[in-house]
Amino acid sequence: MSRRSSALPWLLVVAGAILVAGYAGADEKASPRAAAAKPSVTAPLSAADVYRKCEASVATLGFARKDPADPKTTHTEYGTGVIVHEAGYILTNAHILRRGGKGAAGIHGRDYPCRVVAVDEMRDLAVLKVDAEQPLTPIQFGHSSTLVPGDPIVTIGSPFGVGLSVTTGVVAALNRSTKSDYTSFPSMIQTNTAINPGSSGGPLLNMRGEMIGINTTSKTGANDMGYAIPVDRIREALPEILDPEGRLGFVLGLRVTTGSPAAVTDVAKGAPAEAAGIRAGDFVIGVGGATVASGIDYSFALMNCHAGEPLRLRLVRGGQTIDLAATPAAIPPRNPDNPPNLVPGLVREYYEGTWDRLPDFATLKPKATAKAETFDLGPYRGKDNFALRFTGYIDVPADGIWAFYLKSDDGSRLWIGDRLVVDRDGAHPPTENRGFIPLMAGKHAIRVEYFDRTELEELAVSWEGPKVKKQAVPAGVLFAAQSK
């Protein structure tokens, strides 16, 4: 992601104050490791006990959609999810959402409507939300880094939508790479348990009932050969997938570790967190009245925050519990450029060379310059060792926070005006990154830079915003300055 909270010179400094009123039941002294839940070292459980411990933290999922050719017919895509926060957030695989539909989650005998909060198709992860009347039971996160082949495991899923089912097996191998028809999976956990349709998104558990992975895919044509996304990778990915500050358009200015406890590693200069007196080395144990036991809890807690509204934070510093208030600052929306005399399309410049990262285009002379309707490789598809730069304007239809997506092989970047929104630089396989930016309606300068070395070449630019579902940026919203 390109947005960095540490580089915010335009932020208003918001005064923070130590609160007398805090979280109920606070001790004068507290250990962050006592305040943050840590996996306990316990004797292995039986598979039945693992199921009993985790049953309330696993959801059956169904996404129903009408058949466009026959509205009387309903098709349902089944899956499984894991409750990762008591406020009703559920983690699952993104691929079960590919066909859309109205979502429902079955949790401990009750059905709830669910909505999509965030999707990362390249990692095949998605976060859903249900609104329950009471706090739900989140799964306990374990660690995948300590696994060795032969470790016993338990999986819970809902194969073909029949309801929660349990299988047992072992870790067959680690760091396996595999592919599906929707993405590539590096460094997966291979198990000897089958992952049937409907079981995707369910937890892979150790014998302490801790989640060590998300069951995701199986080997086509093989029996009992499943693959799971390691939980350590999920732990690192979730804050980026959620990106509450970018998604909701505010800045607090804290960076915390993803594990337990949630330790502050950086406080952005001039940010509300600095003004409130928060320091690197503090431990966050509460946000807005919600308990924080890990960096993941911290990210989910920020999903309820709003710019301009004071936010209570509970910290541990030097063994003392303290309560502070910080007011998240709004990220001001960018005003449109709206230049006159635009024509449909973009300007596409073609460069030749061999690079490991995007070149400095200001120092290069293009080999060819032409008009392009969209961000398309055009006649350069199939070539190697080249770069493209697209420039023009994008017509944003409504005020709000807009998400831009870049998928490329190899490197790419997307700029709105002078703001770097998405950074996919470097030589890599086709993967997708996303960035957020608040924009006012109107025409904004846009620039996309891309380079390719050898073999495959791919570039895709998508957007999502108010009343616009994620889709490729259409030609109808792209414009260029009229040629002189």
Image (spheres, rainbow, N blue to C red):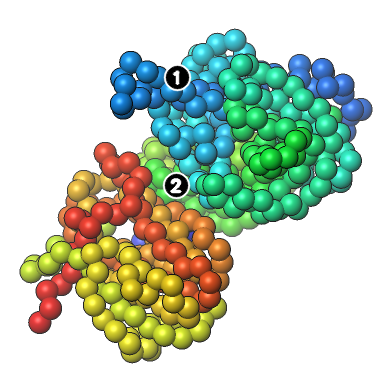
Q: Which mark is residue 245?
A: 2
Toward the viewer: 405 or 430? 430
Residue marked by disc 1: 113
Determine whether the residue tagged by mark 1 lies in a helix, strand or loop.
Answer: strand
Question: Outermost residue, top direction?
Answer: 109
Q: Nearer the viewer, residue 56 or 406?
A: 406
- Residue 129 as seen in the image, left or right of residue 41: left
The Cα–Cα distance between marks 1 and 2, rounded to whole angstroms, is: 26 Å
Residue 451 in view of the camera: no
Q: Residue 236, position in %: x, y? A: 63, 49
Residue 483 or 380: which is nearer the viewer? Answer: 380
Question: At which x and y percent is residue 275?
Answer: 48, 52
Q: Residues within 10 Å of mark 1 (few under 14, many from 20)?
A: some
Residue appearing at x 89%, y 41% in the figure: 150
Is 36 rendered above or below residue 186? above
| Marks 1 and 2 in Cβ contact (< 8 Å) | no
Q: Quadrant of the C terminus?
A: bottom left
What residue type is disc 1 on?
Answer: Pro
Q: Position of residue 332 (x, y in %)?
A: 30, 53
Residue under the point 20% across and 56% down: 477
Q: Is residue 248 above or below residue 350?
A: above
User: Where on the picture, by quarter, is residue 310?
Assistant: top left
